[in-house]
Image (cartoon, rainbow, N blue to C red):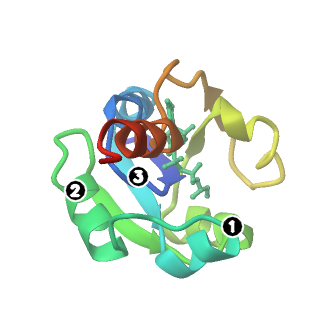
């Protein structure tokens, strides 16, 4: 059984998130997803709208996802890979070559165009400004 691992914040869950998780699952048989903690987001200079327990619950409920955990640190990627015995790491290509140092093969998948959490936040702010 091939075990796939991927990571993300998955805030304001959208179609780009769903597609990368479904395509990650297609790389193997069992999909493990690390969801970034609120503290990790803050360190990355981002603030999630939905708190970690809700983002975790949404991702866990998806048919293509087998297991979830909280990602505390970007530097611990290889520890997570070893702990969950992952055979491959899959990330969107906005992270291209950023995680080539890990101990398993890495595949960067093309992002879904024209959608992102930042775009959603800006659209909502514009449409509902009054
Ligand atoms: N994604 C995508 N298409 C989009 C938007 C996002 O394929 N239109 C992918 C990203 O490439 C990433 C995943 O969805 O692989 C999650 O994206 P984010 O929630 O933005 O996660 P990020 O902040 O990049 O956190 O350890 C790495 C981090 O935890 C990743």
Report the side of 106 relative to 37 (left or right): right
Q: Position of residue 80 (x, y in %)?
A: 57, 68
* Mark-to-mark CA distance, 1 and 2: 22 Å
Q: Is disc 2 placed on a helix, strand or loop?
A: helix
Q: Which residue is mark 1?
A: 44
**Above or below — where is 53 with respect to 25?**
below
Image quarter for ligand 1 equals top right
- Residue drawn at 46 percent across, 27 percent down: 115
Q: Are marks 2 and 3 in contact (CB under 8 Å)?
A: yes
Q: Is residue 2 above or below residue 46?
A: above
Mark 1 and mark 3: span between their CA atoms?
14 Å
- Considering the numbered disc 1 on the image, is that residue within a helix, a strand or a loop? loop
- Does any atom of ligand 1 lie closer than 8 Å to the CB of label 3? yes
Question: Label 3 belongs to which residue?
Answer: 10
Is the residue at mark 2 in contact range of ligand 1, meaning its CB lies under 8 Å from it? no
The quadrant the N terminus occupies is top left
- Report crowding for label 2: few under 14, some 14 to 19, many 20 or more residues within 10 A (C-alpha): few
Residue pointed to by mark 2: 58
């Amino acid at each position: 059984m091939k075990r796939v691992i991927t990571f993300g914040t998955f805030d304001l869950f959208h179609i780009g998130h769903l597609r990368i998780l479904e395509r990650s699952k297609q790389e193997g048989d069992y999909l493990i997803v690390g969801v970034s903690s609120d503290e990790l987001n803050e360190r990355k200079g981002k603030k999630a709208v939905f708190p970690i327990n809700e983002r975790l619950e949404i991702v866990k409920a998806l048919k293509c996802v087998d297991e979830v955990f909280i990602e505390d640190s970007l530097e611990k990627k290889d520890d997570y890979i070893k702990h969950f015995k992952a055979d491959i790491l899959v990330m969107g290509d906005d992270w291209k070559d950023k995680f080539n140092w890990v101990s398993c093969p890495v595949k960067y998948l093309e992002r879904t165009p024209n959608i992102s959490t930042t775009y959603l936040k800006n659209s909502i702010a514009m449409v509902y400004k009054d």
